[in-house]
Amino acid sequence: MTKGQTTHPFTRRQFLETGILGATVVGLSSTLVGQYACTSNRDKMVYGACYHDCPDCCSWEVTVNQGQVTQFQASTSNPFTAGKLCNKMDKFPLEVTYHPSRILTPLKRTGPKGSGEFTPISWEQGLKEVAAKVQENINAFGAQSVLPFGYAGTEGLIQNGAMSARFFARLGASKLGRTICGEAAATGTGAVLGCTTGVLPQDCVHARYLILWGTNTINSNQHLWPLVQQARQQGAKLVVIDPYRSRTAQEADWHIQTRPGTDVLLALSLIQVLLEERLYDEEYLRNYTTGWESLTTYVRDYAPEQVSPTVGLTADTIRTLAREYAQGNPSLIRVLIGMEHQANGASAFQAIAMLPAITGAWRHLGGGLLHYTYELAGQALNWDRLALDGTLGDPNVREISMIQIGQSLNDNELAPPIKTLFVYNANPAVTAPNQNLVLQGLRREDLFTVVLEHFITDTARYADYIFPATTQLEHWDLMTSWGQDYINLNEPAIPPLGEAKSNSDFFRLLAKELGWTEDYFQETDEDIIRSAFNTDHPFLKGITFKSLRQKGWARLNLPQPWIPFKEGHFPTESGKCQLFPPDGVTLPVYQPVEHAAEELESFPLQMMAIKSTSHFLNSSHANAERLIEAEGAPHLDIHPDDAASRQISDGETVLVFNQRGDLQLTARIGDNVLPGVVSMPQGYWSSLLPGKSSANALTTDRFTDRGHGAALQETWVQVQKIG
């Protein structure tokens, strides 16, 4: 960014809260998905983009003939997408839009909650009955007894929340604390830089020392991986810091395997070495940072020899890493989400964000920290139009944390209690921690639950009413990204199948049923998208609704070369990188979680629940037959020492359990984890697994140190063989 252009006013939370995040099947076959099909002059090309909670936000092209999709493929013109979709999405029309199990009519529950027994009803009946029940609960308990539970099932700025946010603000409903992912990381990084935007992904090719810290790039950021490979071909060394030996770690030049939750200790120890051995850029420190001297004093207690036993690395390993990083020119650290899911998550990001300023890495193209990019579109677009709900309703209504939704649904002292739950763009029965407590709440007969969905998910099984939602091929949306600097227009390629309606249309219709007549409920999705371009911000120069319809995508017009902090200009109050917090209090610290001795005796193994699946994303696609078969049964990674002491052999079925629940997995013995640590994948639907439990049956719902993130990795379990 240039001087005067700041990312500070736009937050990760604003991005999440606004969205950053009948035809027939005849004629569409698997041979036409992802490859060119025979077409005629009646074919129409429509542009769109992936809606998933993923940093890549791939652009795509859809060929339509007489209202049917005949070809679906990645954009070849967008240089970031580069003609490739991930294996989750390459057959998206068949596995989602045209899937035979897709919900295409409103459904009303007929059996017990959780049974999945429903009967079809009309939209007219469904809306009328839902509106009546919502009004009844409001009359009895107040508007804050209503809770919306929506997250990043789509990251489109429209279908994620443009209309639903207006609806719930107008209603006066409780707010949802949408902090399960990303907020702790943003809080930590922002404390140092004043923002989270640093290096752009394309510029990582210029790095010569590249650290992927707590990110499995091959699985979760596949379009960055070719750029990482290009940097290596040009001489870069690739280091992966991760407690799990992921696919990416196996490809690295050096895998540094730490103990889970100790990243802040490692980062502070690296800082101690850099300052002690004078491996720093003194000119950069003096001109563009604050708190250098205080930080030097603070890290004296974090010498490698002192932190080594806790981190699980030798002192020599820590010193070698610090020296190599300081000498890398340019050096780049890539961080993503996984590392924040620990008790000291924000502190870890805060400490890591200090490293590029200490070494002066920000001076160089491709040097610094590669984190989020959502602030770029946040500045460029007319966010006041997208976030209209900010001007509506009572700003003092209470907030319910999505992380502790299980506690809230079962809290007899909560005033008012949650009596109405709307779920959209989310599957909390699978993705929320402390799963069994969540399910206990969803079973409440006095909890009125409405779900907007494509399929009868584990959450939808507990709904009183399900309404069929459109897929990305059937509605308008505007797609930005938290991992790159492109913007996409998603135009509906086909009419909605059956009786499906977009999220926006559902909330417009329900507002009408409630008798609301405000003008802002009359705006169409296209109206809202067009208004987002009513700005003269330079990042949007030449980018319009019309131009995006013609091409589908555009790269934001950022200053080139992009070296945002070469001469400081950090969007902090001082304009400098804050190496020591101005308040002197919110320091990066390692505060281990205390456990009672009897608890650790009963549950001695630390459990990581990670996004290690190649074919699911969170819980999306975990019901697609092809992808279930390709992914295989979930497994538990366990170290040979821990397996031997429990007489567990490779491939045996084991029971993993703690005070919150249990589940059955297949043991995979090896060095993917350290002794005392086990790991399992997230994303599997509980209803499709033996024992009807998945990873979150075990995870804790405790918060991180700051940002109210989810400290999922602070979970401890026991493992025993079955039989």
Image (cartoon, grey):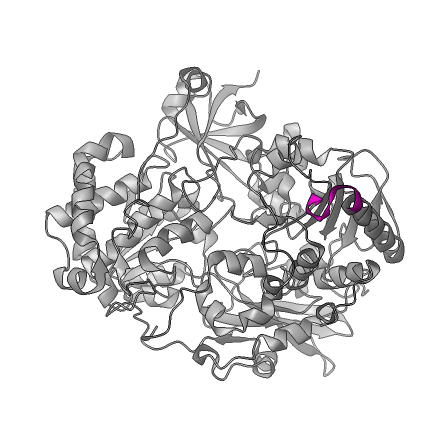
Q: Is residue 501 visible?
A: no
Q: Is residue 540 visible?
A: yes
At x 47%, y 57%, the residue is 12
30 part of magenta stretch: no
226 or 163, nearer to the observer: 163
Picture quarter containing residue 88?
bottom right
At x 78%, y 39%, the residue is 116
696 or 503, nearer to the observer: 503
Please state the horizontal and vertical placement of residue 61, each as a whole percent of the image: 61, 71
Type of secondary structure dominating the magenta stretch: helix
Quarter of the image with the C terminus is top right
At x 82%, y 50%, the residue is 130
Left or right, residue 403 beside residue 344: right
Quarter of the image with the N terminus is bottom left
Left or right, residue 675 beside residue 9: left
Residue 225 lies, with reference to residue 120, above or below; the image says below
Please state the horizontal and vertical placement of residue 634, each as a whole percent of the image: 55, 36
454 or 133, nearer to the observer: 133
Left or right, residue 287 beside residue 258: left
Q: What residue span does the magenta drawing correspond to?
A: 139-145
Among all residues in the image, which is located at the extreme left?
277
Please state the horizontal and vertical placement of residue 483, each as a whole percent of the image: 45, 61
Q: Exactly how many numbered labels are in the figure?
A: 0
Please state the horizontal and vertical placement of residue 335, each as a whole percent of the image: 37, 52
